[in-house]
Amino acid sequence: MGRWEPNARGRLEQAAMELYAERGYEQTTVTEIAKRAGLTERTFFRHYADKREVLFAGSALLQERLVGGLAGAPPSAPPIDAVAAGLQAAAAVLDERHPQARQRQRIIAANAELQERELVKLASLAAAMGEALRARGVSEPAASLAAEAGIAVFKVAFVRWVDTIGARGLGAFVLEGLAGLESLMAGGRP
C-alpha cells in the first residue's frame, strides 16, 4: 500500500457501511473495515476516532448548514420560520445521500448504542439552533422551544423520508411536518 491513498475517507465509509450491513455493527472491527477499504488501521484512525464515528462524521456539516440556513433567514422572520430555513438547508445536504442515509438509518436502528449517539447528535443540533436564534435576538424560552420543535419536525421528516423511494426530497417532508406542527398549535388536526 502506498503512503497516500486517494479518497481514503470515502473508501473507509463505504467499507464500513458494507460490513455493518453484512455482519452487524457490533461484529465489525476497525481492522476489517480498513482491510476491506485496502487501507491500514492507522489510516482509519487518521479519519475517524472509532468505528461509530463513520456513521456520524457528517454531523458537523449538517450543523453548519442548519445554523447557516437559520442565520440567513430574513431578520424579520419569526423564530419558527428561521428554524424552517435552517431545516431546508440541512435537508438539501441529505437529499444528495438518500441511499446512504437509508442504509445508515437501518444500522442505527439495530443498535441501542448508536441510537443513543443519534439522540446526542440531535440534541447538539437543537442546542446549536437555539444559540443561533438567541444570536438573532430571540429570547428564552422561545429560542429553545423553536429549536427543539424544529428538531422534532426534522426527526419525524427524516424517518418518513428514508422510508420512501421516489422523487420527493427531505425538504418536502420537513414542510409537511412544519404544517402539521402549525395545525396542532392552532388546535386542529394535521
Image: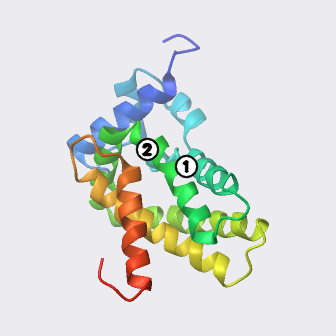
Query: Which type of secondary structure does the marked residue at label 2 adopt?
Result: helix
Which coloring applies here?
rainbow
Number of labels in the image equals: 2
x 40%, y 41%: residue: 95
**Residue 47 found in image quarter:** top right
The circle on residue 88 is none
Q: Which residue is mark 1?
A: 62
Near mark 1 (Cα within 10 A), the count class, few <14, some 14-19 or many ≥20, is many
Q: Which quadrant does the C terminus fall into?
A: bottom left
Depicted 48 relative to depicted 69: above or below: above
Q: CA distance from mark 2 to mark 1?
A: 8 Å
Question: Badge 2 local density, few (<14 within 10 Å), some, or many (20+)?
Answer: some
SS for callout 1? helix
Asked whether the residues under the numbered discs 2 and 1 touch, taking CB atoms below 8 Å apart as contact, a structural biologist would say yes
Q: Residue at x 55, y 49 (%)?
A: 62
Q: To which quarter of the image does residue 16 belong?
A: top left
Question: Can residue 133 be seen?
Answer: yes
Compared with 5, 16 (above or below) is below
The residue under label 2 is: 94
Give amino acid for label 1.
Leu
- Say which of 152 and 111 sits in front: 152
Name the residue type under label 2.
Answer: Leu
* Residue 114 seen in the figure: no
Q: Extreme top residue here?
A: 2
Q: Is residue 157 left or right of residue 131?
A: left
